[in-house]
Structure formats: C-alpha cells, structure tokens
Amino acid sequence: MKDPVAAYHALLEDERLAAASAEQLAAGQRERSLMFGERPLCVAIRPQLMTRRRYERAVSAAEGVHSALAALEKAVLKDDELRLELGLEPEEERLALAEPGFTYSSPSVRLDSFFADEVRFVEYNAESPAGMAYSDNLAAIFASLPVMKAFRKRFRGRFLPTRRRQLSAMLHAFKQWGKGARPVIAIVDWEGLPTAPEFEMFKSFFAGAGVKTVICDPRSLELRRGRLYAQGSPVKGATRPGSCATHTWRGPSASSTAFGPSCCTRR
C-alpha cells in the first residue's frame, strides 16, 4: 500500500493496536498536562499526515501572505489616511507608531489555515500565537504510540518542531534591539486561564536553552525608571499568549502604567 493515509487507517483496523494507542494517547496527555481545562487536547489517534509537496505548498502560500501583510503594515504606518481606515483610538495609534527596535513588529505570527483543494487562510494571528508547545509535546506522544511505531516501519517521516523556532525568532529580535547581552522573557497573561499549562511548557523549554523566563499576570508588572519588571526581574522580552495585549494598557491599573510604556519603549 503506497498511500500513507490509507496505510495508517489500515493499521487501526487492528482493534488491539488501536485500543492500546488510544489508551497511551490519553495517558500521555494527562502526564504532560496537555489539557485545555479538563479536556485533553486530542481525542483522535489519527495525526495530520502531510506530504513534503503539500507542506512546501503551505509554506510558499504562507510566505506570500506574510510578505503582502508586511508591505501593508509599512504602508499603514507611513500613511495617515490609511490608518484612518482602521479606526484606531488615540492610545492605540500611539502604540502602533512606537518604534519596536527590530525589523518586524510581530517577530512571530500564526497564519491559521486549512487545506481544501488549495491552502485557505482564516486568520492572521500576530498576538504571540499559542499552541506551539502543545504541538511539540503532542508530537512526542504520537511518536511513542504503537500504531505510529508500526507505521514508521513502512514510511519515512518527521515531526515539525516549533518551539525552537519561536525562541529563535525572539532571540533574533532581541539581538536587533541590541539593548542587553542576555534576554529575560516574561510570559504575560491573566491568572487562572485554561491555557496556563502551555506557559509552563514554554518556561521549561526556554530555561533549558539558558534563557531566564517568568510567568506573570499583567497586573503584577512594574515600571521603574523606564524599565519593566516582572517578579523582581527586569524584562527584556515579552510574549503574550492570550488576549491580555488588548486590555493591559486601558484604564488606570498598574498594568497600564507598566505594560503600556513597555510597548512603546520595548524595555
């Protein structure tokens, strides 16, 4: 059988193999905290299988869309009339026009998409996109499943890690910014969110790469003499996995005092 998807489905016709794989998938997610609240991230033992050609088509399409949006960003920042189309509040426009200190205002983005006859894009997610640490850990579980081990005896393939690419993008931006020899990353989002386990995964991964990382609520941030602090450490890089970026600088809260100016000065 040459079709890898059909071959994977055929393997799952073995009920014992399928049951053992499903049980291991569920147990692995519990052990690795791959949960969204009380729900496991994945309930299907069928991964996304993609040919190299299809992957390359997706990459090419994403690069084209990203290039177009980067050109649009530059135009909007230069043209007052174009910015009027966005209906920005004065504070939003002030933050939008702040000099980030590196080439792209969003060093890491996610183009949410799906495959039909061609690649279709749903959303340009530039707000420190989440899901990468979940994906890498889920891939590790799938690699250990009995059905995947049987499949890989017949087909060559590889998983696509993303956490290291996220870190590389952040370190590259930090190097361009050039105001410090070593970054300290803050993962900033509201306390009590169901996505919190991924914050810990990223913190562990960054720490393993030698980068100090703290997780904090935006309300705990402090601005001291033009520098942003989280849990007593000066922050030299921030990732905002959720929606806090749309709220932190509004109103008289402590986070508006600390986080808002940090977006302008990138301190």
Image (cartoon, rainbow, N blue to C red):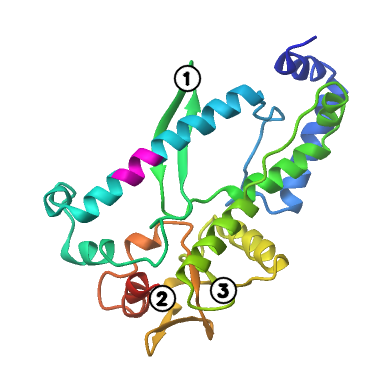
- Viewed as shown, does residue 98 lie left or right of 117? left
Quadrant of the frame with the C terminus: bottom left
Q: CA distance from mark 3 to mark 2?
A: 21 Å
Quadrant of the frame with the N terminus: top right
- In magenta, the rendered stretch is 67-71
Q: Which residue is mark 2?
A: 219
What crowding class fits label 1: few (fewer than 14 Cα within 10 Å), some (14-19), or many (20 or more)?
few
Q: Is residue 187 shown to the viewer in this render?
A: no
Which structural element holds mark 1? loop
| Farthest-out residue, top | 1
Q: Amino acid at mark 1?
A: Glu
Which structural element holds mark 2? helix
- Viewed as shown, does residue 95 lie left or right of 245? left
Nearer the camera: disc 3 or disc 2: 3
Residue closest to the eye, 171 or 222: 171
What crowding class fits label 2: few (fewer than 14 Cα within 10 Å), some (14-19), or many (20 or more)?
some
Q: CA distance from mark 2 to mark 1?
A: 43 Å
Q: Which residue is mark 3?
A: 183
Which structural element holds mark 3? loop
Q: Amino acid at mark 3?
A: Pro
Residue 247 is one of the magenta-drawn residues:
no
Estimate the x, y position of residue 176 in percent, counting from the top left. 48, 66
